[in-house]
Image (cartoon, rainbow, N blue to C red):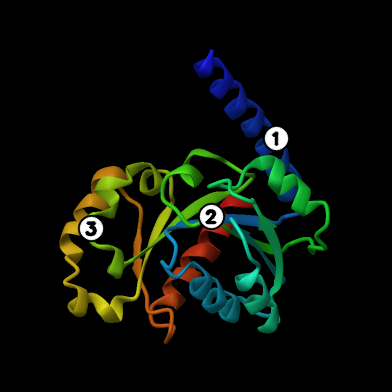
Amino acid sequence: MRLELKRAIYEENDELARKINEGLRSRRIFTVNVLGSPGAGKTSLLTRVAERLRPEPLAVIEGDVASDIDTVALKALGIDAYQIETGGDCHLNAPMMEAVLGRMEISDGSWLFIENIGNLICPAEFVIGEDLKVVVASVAEGSDKPYKYPAAFSKSAACILTKIDLREAVGFDEGFFRAGLASVAPGAPLFPINGRTGQGVDAVVDWLKAARASSLK
């Protein structure tokens, strides 16, 4: 019975996510689901990406268990940001997306970034209407993350490695990390960045633009 219930939940979520994606794509809105642990640097990445995509229209959906700290910070920078508080749920799902999209004013042709709840397990299991997922991992988390959380990395189209200025300080083994990523997500590009200075973010933006152009042909 538990297996059947779980299957039904996934099927209902996936069907709604498909409809959400169709609706967004019909308006040429390109949607990126950003996964990563708490403190990995997801919000800093989105801030830097938004700086480089301006003046193109862009919106961000912030998912958190509680608080709107990141949403307030993004709005203060002039970024159109909307909040989802799950009240305890460890991931966003398609019904949550449907609800927030119903109160958003998002322009046709926009970029839409979704910062998912901070963990590398549950968010990887749910599609929420995105065109693609990317996973953010910081060097401070250790070089073993692709091995320990393979689903988050294998289901992501790219990996952004943040806080690279701390590599030596924390003893990060980039070769080991790259080997792990290649084993679970062959062909997925890795983008080392520094969210404080913006180093490496141009390459991320170039890749996103190419992915959008390919997806919305």
Residues at marks 2 and 1 touching, judged by CB atoms closer than 8 Å: no
Q: Quadrant of residue 23?
A: top right
Res 167 → quadrant: bottom left
Element at label 3: helix
- Horizontal side of 199 relative to 209 (left or right) equals left
Residue 33 point in image, percent of width and height: 55, 54
**Eye-nearest disc, 3 or 2:** 2
Q: Nearer the viewer, residue 214 or 150?
A: 150
Q: Is residue 26 visible?
A: no
Mark closer to the chain start, 3 or 2: 2
- Tag 3: residue type? Arg
Specify the quadrant of the image occupied by residue 20.
top right
Q: Residues within 10 Å of mark 2 (few under 14, many from 20)?
A: many
Ranked by sequence position, the earlier of labels 3 and 1 is 1
The structure residue drawn at horizontal position 53% and vertical position 71%, both measured from the top left corner, is 43
Dot 3: few (<14), some (14–19), or many (≥20) neighbours within 10 Å?
A: some
- Check disc 1 and report the residue beneath it: 16
Which percent across, then down, holds residue 206? 48, 70
Q: Is residue 91 above or below residue 79?
A: above
The residue pinned by badge 2 equals: 117
- Find the distance from the CA under tag 3 to the CA under tag 1: 35 Å
Disc marking residue 178: 3
